[in-house]
Amino acid sequence: GKEMHKADLTLIDDTGVQVRLTLWDTQAMNAQRDIGVHKPVAFRRVKVGDYGGVSLSGAQGTFVEPKIPETEALQEWWSTQGSRGPPVKSLSSQGGSGGKMDAFADRKTIGDIKGQNMGYQNEKGD
C-alpha cells in the first residue's frame, strides 16, 4: 500500500471547546506551512466522526485568516483569553485512543444496564 502522511490539528473556538482535525497526504505535509499556529482557520467539507469522541477529517477547503466578521472576534478572544488557559472541554479522545475502555469501577453489569433502561432513551445509546 501507499504510505500516507498524517497531521492532527487541535482546533478551539471562543467557547473553549476543542476538537481534533486530521489531515492526510498533501494537506498534512503542507499544514504547518499553510496554516501555521494560532491563526483563525475555516475548513470546508470535513467529515465528522464519532469513534472515541468527536473528530474531524479530510477538509476539502482550507481558508487561513478568512475575510469574514468572525475572524477578528476570534483573534481578539484568543489574544485576551483563549491563549491564557486550558480548554474547557475536548470533544476528541486524546492520542488516538478511540475505543478505550472505561476503568473497571465505571463499568456496569448487564443487570445494571437493564435496570437503568440504558440504551432505550435515545437513538445513539448511553
Image (tube, rainbow, N blue to C red):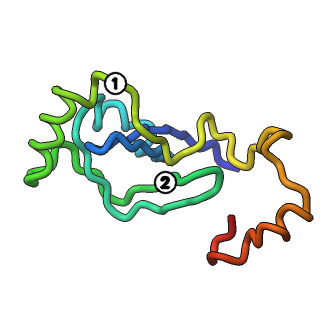
Q: What residue type is labelled 1?
A: Gly
The one of 122 and 10 positioned closer to us in this rendering? 122
Residue at point 77%, 67% (across, down) = 116
Instruction: Rate crowding at label 1 as few (under 14), some (14 to 19) or many (20 or more) other CA atoms within 10 Å.
Output: few
Residue at point 22%, 29% (across, down) = 81
Residue at point 85%, 70% (across, down) = 114
Dot 1 or dot 2, earlier in sequence: 2
Estimate the x, y position of residue 9 in percent, counting from the top left.
43, 38
Question: Residue 60 occupies which quadrant of the picture?
Answer: bottom left
| As drawn, 19 above or below 77 | below
Describe residue 118's horizontal placement relative to residue 110 as left or right. left
Residue at point 30%, 45% (across, down) = 15
Tell me the number on the disc at residue 57: 2
Q: What element carries label 2?
A: strand
Q: Name the residue under label 1.
A: 85
Instruction: Rate crowding at label 2 as few (under 14), some (14 to 19) or many (20 or more) other CA atoms within 10 Å.
Output: some
